Amino acid sequence: MNAPDPLRPGPADLPTVLLVDDEVRSLDAMRRTLDEDFGILTAESAEAARDLLARQEVAVILCDQRMPGQTGVEFLKEVRERWPDTVRIVISGYTDSEDIIAGINEAGIYQYILKPWVPDHLLQTVRTAVEARLLQQGLSRLELDLRSGAPLLRARRQQRLGEARAAFDFERIVRAPGSPMDGVCATAAKLARYDLPVLIGGESGTGKELLARAIHYASPRADGPFVLENCAAIPDTLLESELFGHKRGAFTGAFEDHVGLFQRAHGGTVFLDEIGETSPAFQVKLLRVLQEGELRPVGSTRPVPVDVRVVAASHRRLDEEVRAGRFREDLYYRIAGATLHMPGLRERRGDILPIAQHLLALVAQELGRPGMRFGDGCLRCLVSYDWPGNIRELRNEIARAVALADGEMLGPDCLSLNLRQGRSAMTAAAVGAPAGLPASGTLQERLDAVEAMVLREALERHRWNKTRVASELGLSRVGLRAKLQRLGLEDRS
Ligand SMILES: Nc1ncnc2c1ncn2[C@@H]1O[C@H](COP(=O)(O)OP(=O)(O)OP(=O)(O)O)[C@@H](O)[C@H]1O
């Protein structure tokens, strides 16, 4: 998490909002909710807030009730005396509401917001507070519209939406003319227009997230949020609180109320990546939320309505997982309103070159090595390799080659051994492996055995250094740990 910069000035033509909270995480969450519409200042203590108020005009203060030394209401009383023009809002947990009500008049509090706050509601409250302040100053509606920055905001929002739409357009999914991806994109573009849940299948690194984003930005929800969760990356218990939020004290370590991802995605799209890795217990909870259109944060009895479109993805065949009893059938039919399949890179070899050229330009720019190009030998290796890690592996390989290259021409010598020898890491592991491949079993069981073998081989080679293994295999550390757990590989770290 980036620490908020306390003196990051808002654009001069937007009203300024000062956020005061000793919890950096909460400050960050509020800042992210408001900083498109307002100039934001943050303070981690009443003292820091006083300094800022003395230096700069502030339209609205949002202050947490629980702060060390002085309560939010006490601080706002002081603010009222010294800076009476500010609109004062206090944020509190349910248990503090009596103290706040007692101090509401003295501190001239415009509104108090109960935790967990909902982003849309917080934003709306601050917008109304800014308008109230301008009206108090006797401005006409037109002046009010201008001073609250509304036209500028509308223009900025339109511009940002336009940029996101252009960046994630189906046409920007790089492919060769006549690629199997043409059909996938054409179907996805049609589905995008309707509020159907979409399930995207395909191996890791084939571009499922890219496709999910393109669906969102081509949908009527495009100006709502797109939020993403990798269900394989965090344990089940945390996943529930990540997605649906929690109340303070709901479990050990829940020091603050937390707004879940579904609430943050209200009006937009939630992308649930690797949904096949979730436990049956979590699947029941998710199903309930999708069926009822409302959720209960962990530790809360109050239902919260949510309006999201779900796009889910899995590298597994979820219909087969259902047949094997590992994925709930009722949830499958909820999320698989329509299904799309991303072909692996080796099933669309024609795409390898255009994607490689595209990635080389990106990577060369990122690494500050303009003018890099592929030599013929290098291109031959790229097209004849099987790419088990798909486009993510291709990107890693290109980044490595650019970093290793002495000149601007990438020759085969810049590529890893597997590529030069034209065999995938999977084949390489199998070649060097002792008799380990099962001769019988379901496809999934055999794939698991191969996966376990590849992981074990890489772990041994890197002496169980998981950071290196994850990096080599194009996985995150958490993703790697989840795989090791699932496959029952001994954890020696
Ligand atoms: N057609 C494409 N053109 C250019 N870049 C692509 C293309 N498809 C995927 N990528 C890039 O490849 C990387 C992997 O793609 P993405 O994360 O969408 O794959 P994924 O299938 O969701 O993988 P995982 O299941 O492991 O999360 C990303 O950096 C993405 O931008």
Image: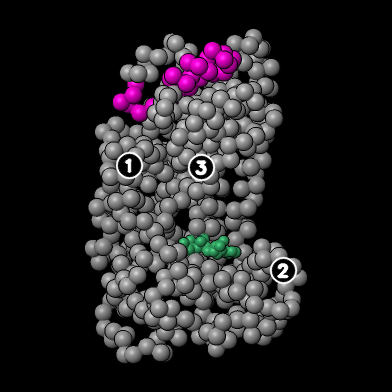
Q: Is 180 positioned to the left or the right of 369 in the image?
A: left
Q: In which quadrant of the rendered view does residue 262 lie?
A: top left
Instruction: Judge the density around disc 2: few (<14), some (14-19), many (≥20) Cα neighbours within 10 Å.
Output: some
Q: In which quadrant of the rendered view does residue 402 lie?
A: bottom right
Q: Outermost residue, right direction?
A: 371
C-alpha span from label 1 to label 2: 46 Å
Residue 122: % across, % down: 47, 29
Q: Is 172 positioned to the left or the right of 71 in the image?
A: right
- Three-letter code, disc 2: Arg
Q: Which numbered disc, 1 or 2, marks the residue that appears first in the sequence?
A: 1
Instruction: Judge the density around disc 1: few (<14), some (14-19), many (≥20) Cα neighbours within 10 Å.
Output: few
- Three-letter code, disc 3: Pro
Q: Residue under label 1, please give it.
A: 254
Question: Residue at left 74%, top 76%?
Answer: 408
Asked if the magenta segment contains residue 85, the reply would be yes
Q: Is 265 positioned to the left or the right of 318 in the image?
A: right
